[in-house]
Image (cartoon, rainbow, N blue to C red):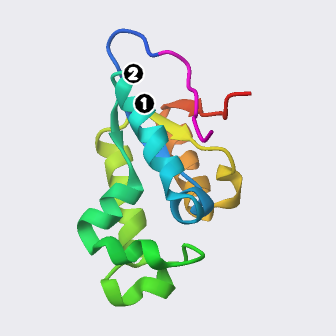
Amino acid sequence: HHGLAAPEKEAGAADAKLAEPVEAAVGTPGVAHLAAAHLRAQGHEVFNPVENDVARFGEEVLSSPTGNPEEVRHTGLTARKVMEDDCTWICRHAEAIALLPGWEKSGGVRVELALAEYLGLEIIHLVRPA
């Protein structure tokens, strides 16, 4: 079971940016989508970077076995464009950032977390239910 749990949301839901490690985005893309669905069901507006990348650059961005943007550069996706989209959304809209298990392995997520902490956003640690 790939379910994820987050603290129950209070009235006045936060806009949340889902921060997933490369493994969640590529190795098991369903995990990021399940986490986004779980947060949305709690009333959060969610920016899912995987969904954003697919919408902007096409389904082929999911074909990278490692999540390295260089492997799908021909789609137009680059690390700079990904971080621009993600960090812009965090700065303009996010009230929280939700971290999937394994987030520590992703340089991009570490940058996003530092930004979220600097901005004083709520940090939500998603966990796999026992």
**Taking the image as drawn, is residue 79 in sight?**
no
* Mark seen at residue 79: none
Please provide percent x and percent y for residue 128.
67, 34
Please provide percent x and percent y for residue 52.
31, 58
In the image, 115: left or right of 10? right
Q: Residue furthest front?
A: 1
Q: At label 2, which amino acid type do we have?
A: Gln
Q: As displayed, is residue 13 above or below residue 116?
A: above
On the image, which quarter does residue 126 sit in?
top right
On the image, which quarter does residue 5 sit in?
top right
Q: Is residue 4 magenta?
A: yes
Q: Residue furthest bottom?
A: 74
State the residue position of label 2.
42
Between 101 and 1, the residue placed more toward the observer is 1
Q: As displayed, is residue 7 above or below residue 33?
A: above
Other-residue count near label 2 (Cα within 10 Å), few / some / many at <14 / 14–19 / ≥20: some
Residue at the location (62% across, 63% down)?
107
Image quadrant in which the N terminus is located: top right
- Residue span colored magenta: 1-8
Q: At label 1, which amino acid type do we have?
A: Leu
* Mark seen at residue 39: 1
Residue at the location (39% across, 75% down)?
61
